[in-house]
Amino acid sequence: MKVIKIAPRGYCFGVISALNIVQDAAKDESLPRPIYVLGMIVHNEHITKAIDDLGVITIDDKTKTREELLEQIDAGTVIFTAHGIAPAVNQKAMDKGLTVIDASCKDVIKTHVLMKEHIDAGYDVIYIGKHGHPETEGALGVDKDHIHLLSKADELEKLALTNEKIIITNQTTMSLWDVYSLSEKIKEKFPQATFIKEICNATQVRQEAVANQAGAADLTLVVGDPHSNNTARLSQISIERAHTPSHRIASVADIDLNWLKEIETVAVTAGASTPTAVTKEVIEFLEAYDPKDETTWDTTSQITSDKVLFKRK
């Protein structure tokens, strides 16, 4: 089977940085134990399992906020995830006497600073993001009174702002095209608003790669965790921009052989938090796959924790 290996794909700088921070913390004997991560360090179960094997405990519950999760930690060290953290949660962790390590992506921090500077200058902020996502939660925590979340156009009707000073910005992992489309609708209602795009560069180039390269395939497989927003956007872009059907898979084990019937070319990409080894295993399976040879049909994953983290000296 022909495989288009969409590039760039996989780990971004922010993910690499966060993983290095966790591995360094696990080896640092001076840090108070236990060591916790408040939520998934990045949205990938393979990585969560790998850092658990290092002795770092992930505290996660999709129904709870970061502040609520923090209630489960009374001593030790807490690592904030790449998605960013609300200032109040950071302060609460310090008030509890915890050692705090911030693994927030620099692009997320940049958005927080941007919003805070404009709010201090008298602006309201319309933030385009996903409800319930930890990056959105952290961003809204910068200023709950002057940051207003929008996820889709029909929510715009309920938004009433009289401020003549408004900026529009966004969660860093949203679809580039969705953000532009929604920002234009916002400006129709609030013509005084200025749009400041905060799609991170890694997200943008990966999305553009799918839009430009997936059209040559019959099917796109996006490798990544079901909770990963940037992975979901890649699949969406394959369908909407490249007009190529797409499935998201966490690993080779999720491939349904029925998807491959009458398929000659498959494009493969991966979310920014997807380990390279997981994507490589998917590509190797597809390259070897022969619909007439049953020996090539085994989708059992051989990924182990030691394969998904960078080796730290």
Image (cartoon, grey):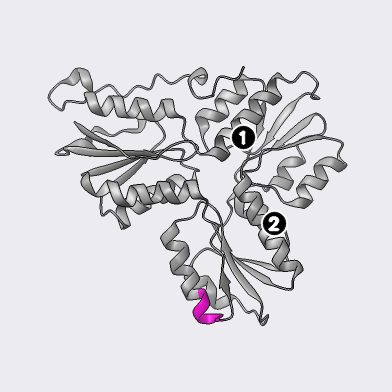
Image coords of residue 47 (percent x, y): 54, 29
Near mark 1 (Cα within 10 A), the count class, few <14, some 14-19 or many ≥20, is many
The quarter of the image holding the N terminus is top left
Residue 266 or 198: which is nearer the viewer?
A: 198
Q: Is residue 116 above or below residue 244?
A: below
Q: Is residue 37 above or below residue 173?
A: above
Residue 134 visible in rendering? no
Residue 280 or 117: which is nearer the viewer?
A: 117
* Image side of residue 40 versus residue 238, left or right: right
Q: Which residue is mark 1?
A: 18
Q: Residue at x 62, y 41 (%)?
A: 82
Q: Quadrant of residue 194?
A: bottom right
Name the amino acid, label 2: Val
Q: Residue at x 42, y 25 (%)?
A: 277
Q: Which residue is mark 2?
A: 113
Q: Main secondary structure of the magenta part?
A: helix
Image coords of residue 180 (percent x, y): 45, 66
Name the amino acid, label 1: Ala
Q: Start and end of the magenta stretch?
A: 186-191
Image coords of residue 44 (percent x, y): 51, 35
